[in-house]
Image: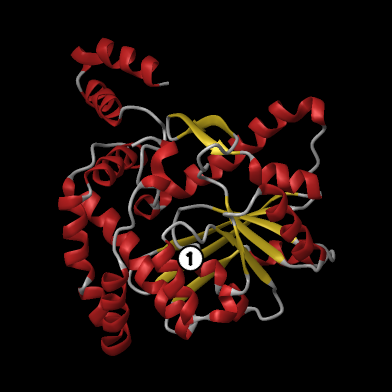
């Protein structure tokens, strides 16, 4: 499954499945609902072959060793656990969670200048944890750019849990100028606008940079928007640490981004590479938090795994080098 095909994958459940989980969460609480995650993980392991293979290929890169079925199960379980926690975060806030905040002072320092901030996240950990930041710090206004059309069933049910939070979503399914206009309106009022910056949609402009040992495509739209609006940029990572523990990490990235047209390709590549390096750092620190379940590198996953085998077997090194050149 290539990077361009990720939107074509069906949702992992349907209205009945989601309602069942929501019902269990509502009646049994978080502890009981977490028990229901195990059959869900088993289902994905058995039925969702492309996601299973993508998980193994990614984990081999992040862990630096071959990934087994237990690793894949842990990866899927981490994803399912964060989805479940979104229910409790939206309905009850963060009080039941042990959340460590790191670097929030740097984000607030940017906001103190009277201008909004573009906060770039990723599919690493829980982006939902960033949405409820406004509940912990009511003085911070947070808008989130999300594609309502992707996983539409789940989005509608989560929106129903907290309509006020849903009202702060900027729909990424709109055309580019409409998205940029809404971001400008929000940041002109001093808001934080959070958006994901690690997955390019079909037809979206992207640039290829080094990430976890090979070239991978990253979208350039977030950086073009920041440059057009001359916005400061910060990074955010909402890492799930197991149990009820989360770590929200904020990092300043650049001030009042501006890119001259003549230097645009080189400047964009440099910005995206810096972003990819920070994402890589956190992915290696929390490898099971990565939730891009498709061939992110647009390469044959088997060739990467074979290269890993070649490194462990010196006699196969020559074949591994050839595979590396082809995949790169």
Label 1 SS: strand
Q: How is the image coloured?
A: secondary structure
Q: Quadrant of residue 261?
A: top right
Q: Is residue 256 visible?
A: no
Q: Name the residue: 44% across, 37% down.
A: 4
Q: Name the residue: 20% across, 74% down.
A: 35
**Front one among 266 and 316:** 266
**Front one among 60 and 6:** 6
Q: x and y percent of residue 184 in the render?
A: 77, 58
Q: From the image, which quarter does the N terminus lie in?
A: top left
Q: Is residue 63 left or right of residue 246?
A: left
**Front one among 52 and 280:** 52
- How many numbered marks appear? 1
Q: Is residue 144 visible?
A: yes
Q: Is residue 324 left or right of residue 95?
A: left
Q: x and y percent of residue 223 in the render?
A: 68, 43
Q: Badge 1: how crowded within 10 Å, few (<14), some, or many (20+)?
A: some
Q: x and y percent of residue 147 in the render?
A: 53, 57
The residue that mark 1 highlights is 247
Q: Name the residue: 31% across, 64% down.
A: 80
**In the image, residue 130 above or below residue 276:** below
Q: x and y percent of residue 316 in the render?
A: 21, 14
Q: From the image, which quarter does the C terminus lie in?
A: top left
Q: Name the residue: 34% across, 60% down.
A: 79
Q: Quadrant of residue 319?
A: top left
**Front one among 265 and 154:** 154
**In the image, residue 39 above or below residue 67:** below
**In the image, residue 183 above or below residue 268:** below
């Amino acid at each position: 499954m290539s990077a361009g095909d990720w939107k074509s994958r069906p949702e992992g459940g349907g209205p009945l499945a989601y309602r069942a989980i929501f019902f269990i969460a509502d009646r049994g609480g978080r502890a009981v609902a977490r028990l229901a995650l195990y059959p869900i993980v088993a289902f994905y392991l058995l039925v969702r072959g492309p996601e299973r293979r993508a998980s193994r290929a990614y984990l081999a890169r992040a862990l630096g060793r071959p990934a087994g079925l237990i690793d894949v199960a842990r990866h899927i379980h981490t994803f399912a656990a964060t989805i479940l926690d979104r229910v409790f975060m939206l309905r009850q806030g963060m009080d039941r969670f042990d959340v460590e905040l790191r670097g929030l002072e740097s984000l607030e320092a940017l906001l103190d200048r009277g201008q909004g901030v573009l906060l770039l996240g990723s599919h690493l950990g829980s982006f939902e944890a960033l949405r409820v930041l406004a509940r912990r710090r009511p003085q911070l206004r947070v808008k989130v750019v999300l594609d309502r059309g992707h996983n539409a069933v789940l989005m509608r049910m989560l929106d129903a849990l907290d309509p006020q939070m849903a009202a702060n979503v900027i729909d990424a399914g709109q055309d580019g100028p409409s998205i940029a206009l809404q971001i400008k309106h929000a940041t002109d009022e001093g808001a934080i606008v959070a958006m994901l910056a690690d997955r390019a949609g079909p037809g979206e402009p992207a640039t290829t940079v080094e990430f976890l040992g090979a070239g991978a495509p990253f979208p350039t739209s977030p950086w073009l928007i920041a440059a057009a609006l001359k916005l400061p940029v910060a990074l955010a990572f909402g890492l799930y640490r197991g149990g009820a523990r989360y770590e929200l990490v904020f990092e300043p990235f650049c001030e009042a981004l501006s890119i001259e047209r003549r230097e645009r390709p080189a400047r964009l590549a440099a910005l995206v590479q810096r972003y990819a390096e920070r994402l890589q750092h956190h992915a290696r620190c929390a490898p099971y938090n990565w939730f891009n379940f498709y061939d992110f590198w647009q390469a044959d996953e088997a060739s990467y795994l074979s290269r890993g085998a070649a490194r462990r077997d010196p006699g196969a090194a020559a074949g591994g080098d050839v595979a590396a050149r082809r995949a790169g």
